[in-house]
Image (cartoon, helix red, strand yellow):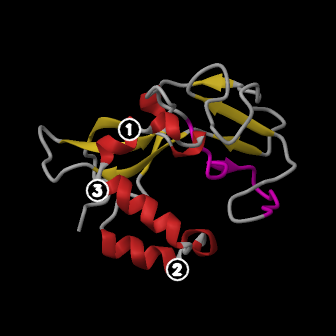
């Protein structure tokens, strides 16, 4: 990591809790995935930056050298090229679980108005897509091949370690 100004560490993005039951301390979630249901990494911004690093927007450190960690030896991020550099590989279980979309309908309506991404999220089709996927998660998975790379999902069971509640 020597010489890097930022650490890009993989996140697993969860979009909805599926069903109300929590069995054996686990929950079912709709997670961003490949077309065939494999896990992918998302990078909302560096997980850490070197002290004194100038950020260009929110957590972004554009133009500076990043040390990139991924879930496989190639880039699994749907928003980056397949051959983007990967400096280290970690197991899927080591990725950060990102619960920001696992919320109630009322919360998401409010979030789309005040979030730092409000300009993008406030578009009606963004909310409609989230609402449709949340209500019909199996359909979201079944239609993966019909959607863009950054809008594909899988159903997963994960330990409920205090992620956001549905309330």
Please tell me whether residue 60 belongs to the stretch shown in magenta: no
Give me the C-alpha separation between circle 1 and circle 3: 12 Å
Quadrant containing the N terminus in the rendered view: top right
Q: Give 108 or 55, whichever is nearer the viewer.
A: 108
- Identify which residue is drawn at 66% across, 52% down: 45
Residue at image mark 2: 114
Q: Which residue lies furthest to the front in this view?
A: 146
Please tell me whether residue 52 belongs to the stretch shown in magenta: yes
2 and 1 marks in contact (CB < 8 Å): no
Q: Which of marks 2 and 1 is nearer the N terminus?
A: 2
Magenta residues, as a range? 41-56
Q: Residue 135 carries which label?
A: 3
Give the left or right position of residue 108, taking residue 8 as reference.
left
Give the left or right position of residue 12, taking residue 104 as reference.
right
- Identify which residue is drawn at 83% across, 41% down: 65
How far from the left and from the top, in percent, is residue 94? 46, 32
Q: Earlier in the sequence, mark 3 or mark 2?
A: 2
Q: Which residue lies furthest to the right in this view?
A: 63
Against 5, residue 142 (above or below) is: above
Q: How crowded is mark 2: few (under 14 residues within 10 Å), some or many (20 or more)?
A: few
Question: SS for tag 1?
Answer: helix
Residue at image mark 1: 141
How far from the left and from the top, in percent, is residue 8? 67, 41
């Amino acid at each position: 990591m020597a010489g890097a100004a930022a650490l890009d560490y993989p996140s697993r993005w969860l979009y909805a809790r599926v069903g109300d039951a929590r069995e054996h301390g686990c929950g079912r979630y709709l997670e961003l995935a490949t077309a065939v249901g494999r896990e992918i990494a998302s990078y909302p911004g560096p997980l850490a930056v070197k002290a004194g690093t100038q950020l260009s927007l929110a957590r972004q450190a554009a133009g500076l050298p990043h040390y990139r960690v991924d879930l496989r030896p190639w880039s699994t991020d749907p928003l980056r090229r397949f051959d983007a550099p990967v400096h280290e590989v970690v197991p899927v279980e080591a990725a950060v679980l990102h619960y920001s979309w696992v919320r109630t309908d009322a919360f998401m309506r409010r979030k789309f108005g005040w979030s730092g991404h409000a300009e993008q999220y406030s578009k009606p089709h963004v909310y409609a897509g989230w609402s449709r996927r949340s209500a019909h998660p199996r359909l979201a998975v079944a239609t993966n091949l019909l959607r863009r790379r950054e809008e594909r999902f899988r159903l997963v069971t994960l330990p409920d370690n205090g992620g956001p509640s549905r309330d």
